[in-house]
Image (tube, grey):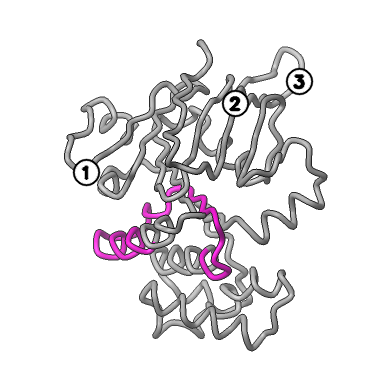
Amino acid sequence: MPDSPIKEPDSEHKLAARLRGITRSFGDGGARLQVLKGINLDVRCGDITMLVGPSGCGKTTLISIIAGTLEADDGELDVFGCNLRTMKKSAITRFRAENIGFIFQQFNLIPTLNCIENVSVPLLIQGKSTRYAEKKAREVLDRVGLGDRMKHRPTQLSGGQQQRVAIARALVHEPKLIICDEPTAALDAKNGRVVMELFESVAKGAERAVIIVTHDNRIFQHANRIASMDDGSVIEVHDLDGVTPLPAHLLHLAHS
């Protein structure tokens, strides 16, 4: 498979992330599997960028590398002007805590903490006071429609409610980059719209961006760009104007 095509950004767009030749393999010797095969991708500030493609094509591996939770084997990776490939692990941890909100597919909520306490965690890690962190947590929980569930623990919530807590936790410290792995998978249409409207408000910032891995074509209308992946490569990037219909093969990939 050739390297992913490079589409240079318009001069009016500042980049949140710039990837060139990113590779990643797992395993050793004859069992070594190359998951990413020279990824080239620009993530623009002010955009919601969605990654679509069949299961196992490397989408989750790619966003983990962008988030700094997984190291690439080779290539260039700049996030908001910082070269994550040359930074020390401690510096990447600090950078991630200050600049990135990651929404995991499995939620990763702390079962012994209630909603307010779970959502407060990113701010407490930053050294904010408990009073400030809980105030901000209440505000964002209310925004995702959980104002009446703030004292509930994860086991007392439905899957969709847990997902919204995870989204609130990712938004509470107002990160510059939100990275999401199937954020609407457990949500009904109404709550999916609420969440996507929140992401749109985040992405509108001149210094902010949202990346979403999804199989949910209900939310494609909220994307500014859709990057189609297959077999470890970005094979095409579609800029959307909100008018032109998506190619049929993209709709198919979203359900693969």
Residue denoted by label 2: 20
136 to 192, vertically: above or below: below
Q: Residue at x 50, y 34 (%)?
A: 42
Q: Is residue 38 magenta?
A: no
Q: How far is disc 3 from disc 2 in space, using C-alphas? A: 24 Å
Residue 50 position in % (x across, y down)? 40, 41
Question: Which residue type carries mark 2?
Answer: Arg
Question: Which residue type carries mark 3?
Answer: Asp
Q: Secondary structure at mark 3?
A: loop
Residue 75 position in % (x across, y down)? 67, 25
* Quadrant in the picture for residue 190: bottom left
Of mark 3 and mark 2, the one earlier in the sequence is 2
* Quarter containing the C terminus: top left
Q: Which residues are magenta?
A: 171-198
Q: Secondary structure at mark 1?
A: loop
Badge 1: residue crowd in 10 Å (few <14, some 14–19, many ≥20):
few
Observer-nearest of 88 and 168: 88
Observer-nearest of 92 and 218: 92
* Quadrant in the picture for residue 13: top left
Badge 3: residue crowd in 10 Å (few <14, some 14–19, many ≥20):
few
153 to 82, vertically: above or below: below
In front of the other: label 3 or label 2? Answer: 2
Residue denoted by label 3: 28
In front of the other: label 1 or label 3? Answer: 1
Residue 32 position in % (x across, y down)? 69, 19
